[in-house]
Amino acid sequence: MDSVVGSRLRVAVICALVLLTMLALAGCGGSGTTSESPPASSVAVTSASPTETPLPTPNVAGTIAFTLYGEDGSGQADFDICVVDTDGTDFRELTGGDACESYPRWSPDGKKIVYMQGPLGDGNPQELWVMNADGSGQVQITDFATNPLSSRTPDWSPDGAKVVFSRWITDAPELAGIAVLNADGRHLRIVTRPERTAVDYWPQWAADGRIYFCRLKPEGGSSYVFRVKPDGTGLERVMKLGSVDQFLSYRLSPNAKLVAIQDAKTGRLEVLSVRGGGKRVTLIDPVADYLGEAAADVAWSPDQQAVAIAGLFDTGFTRLFVVNADGSGLSAVPGVDLARDPAWRPE
């Protein structure tokens, strides 16, 4: 990768999955326990409100999976997957042990979770695992560490039979592509093979059967949403997200008609139509007042009437927020600090 591409990728660090391995922490351990309240941590927590008035408890019912940051007994970083109801009850830690688990995504029936697992640190590959919703039955479904490939940001097919993910070479993230395999780890299919100056990541398998993903073009300085059929045919550009300097994060709604976008220039997290037109809805303004330096990761509720918001990847850890899709009713899940990668359980 030449210096120009490398420089552009570093500018896009907040939004680009390709730099996930550049986490500053050197190791991770899990407690392997289940508790009724989140573990304590010495890391500073973003305030739930920019004023002295605390945010209310969400009145939107649901269950959210997320990555929780903590520390083990030796002071090492500890990333585990947890679930909690939006009112703060029924908190459960699903993973533990020596590895770091992150980026949970529910199966369409809400009975399983696919997630990333691997050692923390620069250049360490991640593998995909699947477990039951209660944390039992943890099974590894990719094994690319010796290639060396890495498996990132998974999502389920609408029928729950397959998993889509971003596949990239650890030492050459500019060669990222989208891949699909059965939920049991068999029958890998490469869906996209971007040119050397592009990176494909953040795939989402929409209800229309097509896979939507972000394509970052560092040399051109722009990011786009593309969609493609699972067999790799029918590739088409859906929308331009913005320049590398402007676009921070995005998340499509389940029906792929709306998109939540964080704009670095305006400081807002907004919802707009994928096809353009219509009114922009502001969810948080400015994001920095609630998430500090972290970019916003959004999880849509199954009915698309609300979203959960937390930190994005390694850019920061925050409270777990909930807001209506019309921008009203901003709230915070009580008792949850240092969260990221939220995912709303299907009904």
Image: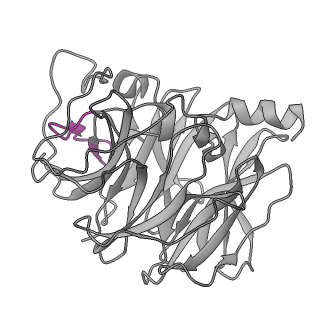
Of 278 and 18, the residue lying toward us: 18
Which portion, as a residue range, is magenta?
A: 322-337
Q: Position of residue 206 (x, y in %)?
A: 51, 72
Q: Residue at x 71, y 57 (%)?
A: 148
Of 23 and 48, the residue lying toward us: 23
Up/down of 299 relative to 121, above or below: below
Q: Residue at x 63, y 43 (%)?
A: 16
- Residue with the most extreme front position: 74
Q: Position of residue 53 (x, y in %)?
A: 15, 20
Left or right of residue 92: residue 200? right
Q: Number of numbered discs present?
A: 0
Left or right of residue 17: residue 31? left
Of 128 and 65, the residue lying toward us: 128
Quarter that holds the C terminus: bottom left
Residue 169 in the magenta stretch? The answer is no
Left or right of residue 80: residue 160? right
Q: Can residue 325 be seen in this snapshot? A: no
Decide whether the magenta segment is chiefly helix, strand or loop: loop
